[in-house]
Image (tube, grey):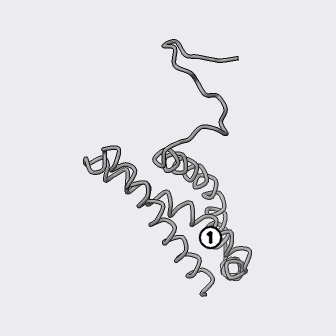
Amino acid sequence: MKISSVNGRPVNLDIKTIELPITAYASILHRVTGILLCASVLVLVWLLQKSLTSEADFLQVQQMLSSSFMKFLMFLILAPFIYHLVAGVRHLVMDVGIGESLEGGQLGAKIVFAASAVLILLTGVWLWGV
């Protein structure tokens, strides 16, 4: 069965066959990382509250943060933050009129992916001291 829109153009409803441009992936990932940041605030506020309760709890949080599991959890919080930050800077640059063309948008998305990958890798090196 062929489904078509009002103007007669075919509509592809099979999500596996849709080819999105790189700018769409950058935009979708920016939104997803924003949602992940909202969820991660719960963990960060809990850690802050626990560390401010008493000196013993502060030392417990400090010890927890040195464990491999918590380093991994912090990495899972920092990686989306880094991507969201870099993509947000791209949006600010576009707000002043730079990179608004199709080619500029594609280049900007590529720069966001590359810069984020490098910064996320450096964050992993910093957390684990490799």
Dot 1 amino acid type: Phe
Quick one: label 1, few (<14), some, or many (20+) residues within 10 Å?
some
**Which residue matches tag 1?**
75
**Residue 17 to residue 110: above or below:** above
Across and down, in percent, residue 66 comes to: 68, 82
Across and down, in percent, residue 84 comes to: 49, 57
**Residue 46 to residue 118: above or below:** above
The image quarter containing residue 78 is bottom right
Residue at the image position 31 percent from the left and 53 percent from the top: 93
Q: With 43 as the anchor, is 37 left or right in this view? A: left
Residue at the image position 37 percent from the left and 50 percent from the top: 91
Q: With 58 as the anchor, is 8 left or right in this view? A: left
Across and down, in percent, residue 47 comes to: 65, 68
Residue at the image position 66 percent from the left and 81 percent from the top: 62
Front one among 102 and 73: 102
Residue at the image position 63 percent from the left and 70 percent from the top: 74
- Total marks shown come to 1
